[in-house]
Structures are given as structure tokens and as C-alpha cells.
Amino acid sequence: MVQFPNHYCTQHFEHEAEYLANRQRWARKHSEQYQHKERHYNHHYNMVTRNRNDNRSEQYKFYRSKQWVDLRQATLNRDHYLCQYCKAYGKLTPNSKTVDHIVPIAYDSTIRADQGNLATICRECHRLKTQWEQKYYGTAQNIAKKDVTEIHDIHRIVILMHQK
């Protein structure tokens, strides 16, 4: 039997050092390749997507501010880490850790710090809501914002999100 953290039994333990050396060599080689790809991806993402214009750049700065950190935590505490969109659908999804702007700040940045415009959301609802926002508000990249009425009611948004 092999005893953790070893990789070889006592009979073949002499191979352990060689195995570890090969593993470290492999990890170093692949880590350098991965880091290069990651740097390229991050640069592209930051320049093309995240900071593609002044408005997006300001949004990114806001999400890195102490004000946002405090608002986010207060919202998570208020909502008890339950997805408010699932809850409106009659389902409880605990341990949701994302806080969403009900009306996206890409559409109306004046209410970005309004806690009444914030709700806890799970990953699946966030994905669906983002798709819905892009169609309804026109918040997707390279699409003009639409002149529509802001919807602040989560129940109504949930119904619209699930319509095909």
C-alpha cells in the first residue's frame, strides 16, 4: 500500500524522487506556457471587452471600489445569500454569492450604488438575465442601447427571462 503523501510503496520508494523531479519539470514547462496564454487573454479581455470604452472602464473601476464591496456584502446579508430570482420563481437556491444590478448599470449608471437596485443572484439566473438584458436593454457589445422602460420588479423580470 502507498502511504499518502507518497506515490510509491516501500518496495519501490527509490523511484519517488525521480517521479517528483519529472513532475516538477513538467509543471514548470506547462506553467510558463499557461501563463503566456493567460497574459495574452487578460490583455485582450481588458482592452477589447472590459475597457472597450470610457463607460465600461468606469463600471470596472466601480466594481473594484470599497463602496461596491460594502454594498455587495450588505445585499448578500439582506438576501441571506439566496438567489432572489429563483425565489421569485418559487425555488430556494442557497449560497448564491453574486450581486446583480436589477437594472444594469450599462443601461443606467446613475443607480449603480442604489441598494434597491441590487439583488443576490445564482449563476444560472445570472446567465439567463444577462442574455435577457442584452435583448431587452441592448447592453451587449456593439449593440445600441434601446429606448425601453426600466423594469425594477424581479418577478416580472423572471417571467420575461423564461419566455422564449
Image: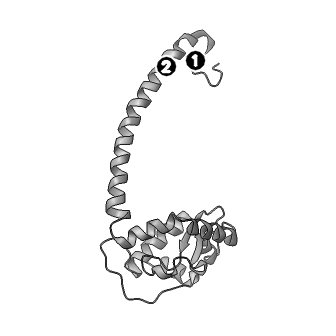
Q: Quadrant of residue 73?
A: bottom right
Q: Are marks 2 and 1 in contact (CB under 8 Å)?
A: yes
Indicate the position of residue 88 as horizontal and vertical percent values: 62, 78
Taking 125 as reference, is 83 left or right?
right
Return the residue found at the far front. 66
**Residue 81 versus residue 153 in the image, above or below:** above
Q: Residue at x 54, y 16 (%)?
A: 16
Mark 2 vs 1, N-terminal side: 1
The residue under label 2 is which amino acid type?
Tyr
The residue under label 1 is which amino acid type?
Tyr
Indicate the position of residue 104 as horizontal and vertical percent values: 47, 77
Indicate the position of residue 154 as horizontal and vertical percent values: 57, 81
**Residue 32 versus residue 119 in the image, above or below:** above
Circle 1: element type: loop
Figure quadrant of the C terminus: bottom left
Figure quadrant of the N terminus: top right
Q: Residue at x 42, y 30 (%)?
A: 28
Q: Quadrant of residue 121?
A: bottom right
Residue labelled with disc 1: 8
Foreground residue among 120 and 115: 115
Can residue 68 be seen here?
A: yes
Foreground residue among 96 and 91: 96
Taking 88 as reference, is 151 left or right?
left
Indicate the position of residue 31 as horizontal and vertical percent values: 41, 36
**Residue 163 versus residue 26 in the image, above or below:** below
Q: Work out how far the residue at label 2 is from the one at label 1, CA to CA, in angstroms.
A: 9 Å
The colour scheme of the drawn protein is: one colour
In the image, which disc is placed on residue 19?
A: 2
Circle 2: element type: helix
Foreground residue among 119 and 68: 68
Mark 2 crowdedness (10 Å alpha carbons): few <14, some 14-19, many ≥20: few
